Image (cartoon, rainbow, N blue to C red):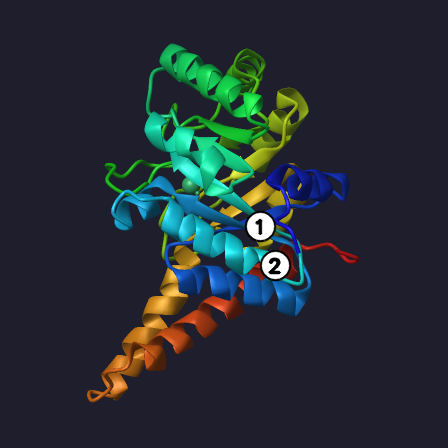
Amino acid sequence: MPLSSTADLVGRAMGRGHAAAAFNVITLEHAEAIVDAAERVAVPAILQISENAVRYHGGRVLPIARAAAEVARAAAVDVSLHLDHVRDEDLLRQAADAGVSSVMYDAAGLPYAANVEATRRAADWAHERGLWIEAELGRIGGKDGEAPLDAHARGARTDPDQAAAYVAATRVDALAVAVGSSHAMTTRTATLDHALIAKLRDGVGVPLVLHGSSGVPDEELVRAAAGGIVKINMGTALNVAFTSTVRAHLAGDGAVTDPRAYLSLGRAAMADTVAHFLRLLASPGD
Ligand code: G3H
Ligand code: ZN
């Protein structure tokens, strides 16, 4: 089956009043696990490769992106490919060749005016090539290599008036918002600002994206999806499942050498995690 586009999956989710789920791909096993789960529960999924994952692969996007794309093409459900948290403009410009239909350009660390200017340039570039583009306003902390940020700190959240102006000025297709979640949480204890999500939904005019969703409890995710979040980004939860499973296996078998013995278990654990979130977020009939 040909790759789906993120614009289509997000648009369909929005039309049905629920959220599309996007999962981080670091290794081939991640892509296989996500697609396996999506097929099992018959719900579409977005595979996303972050700039940090590209860095892990020696700065080369094509090997992991093309591998993920092949896994997605073989799927019996709709799957799209997305490039996530891109700060490097050189990487952004490789997006068109990497087979992705969408990209998140992350200039959230810049002052507002510089964020607008860089993101507008990225959006113009993306739209000329038919790519859907997401950007971030506010500070969603916890990203790799960054100092920790309190999700509840004054000024960390996305301001609704500024967000509306930002989307109008940059012409992005979706907006990642800081509403209480934080990246890389290994406990599911985040509390979201649902009143702020409602204000952003009513004022911004493009789909809202929740990052750092691994730390958000199930009931909060469901409420956020019902309240205006249209794309839910999940990464750490897969890695927790993978690593804890592999660690337990290696602890119990000091003689194992074939990586397939434990990678297959880690991959299955990630698939179970993905299936749980896809089931949770999908509405009946998907
Ligand atoms: O963009 C990716 C997500 O924000 C993943 O965040 O690893 O905390 O689930 P997470
Ligand atoms: Zn993120």
Relative vertical location of residue 238 with respect to residue 12 in this rendering, above or below:
below
Residue drawn at point x = 50 percent, y = 32 percent = 176
Q: Amino acid at mark 1?
A: Ala
* Left or right, residue 132 beside residue 111: right
Which numbered tag is attached to residue 278?
Answer: 2
Q: Residues within 10 Å of mark 2 (few under 14, many from 20)?
A: many
* Coordinates of residue 25 in the picture (x, y in percent): 43, 54
- Residue 204, can we see it? yes
* Left or right, residue 160 beside residue 67: right
- Residue 217, can we see it? no
* Coordinates of residue 153 in the picture (x, y in percent): 36, 30
User: Does the numbered disc 2 mark a residue whose Cβ is under 8 Å from ligand 1?
Assistant: no
Asked which quadrant contains residue 19, the reply is top right
Q: Residues within 10 Å of mark 1 (few under 14, many from 20)?
A: many
> Which secondary structure lies at badge 2?
helix
Residue drawn at point x = 65 percent, y = 54 percent = 44
Which numbered tag is attached to residue 69?
Answer: none
Q: Amino acid at mark 2?
A: Leu
Q: Quadrant of the C terminus?
A: bottom right
In the picture of the structure, the residue carrying the numbered disc 1 is: 21
Q: CA distance from mark 2 to mark 1?
A: 7 Å
Q: Quadrant of the N terminus?
A: bottom right
First reached walking from the N terminus: tag 2 or tag 1? 1
Residue drawn at point x = 66 percent, y = 66 percent = 41
The residue lying furthest to the left in this view is 254
Relative vertical location of residue 196 with respect to residue 50 in this rendering, above or below:
above
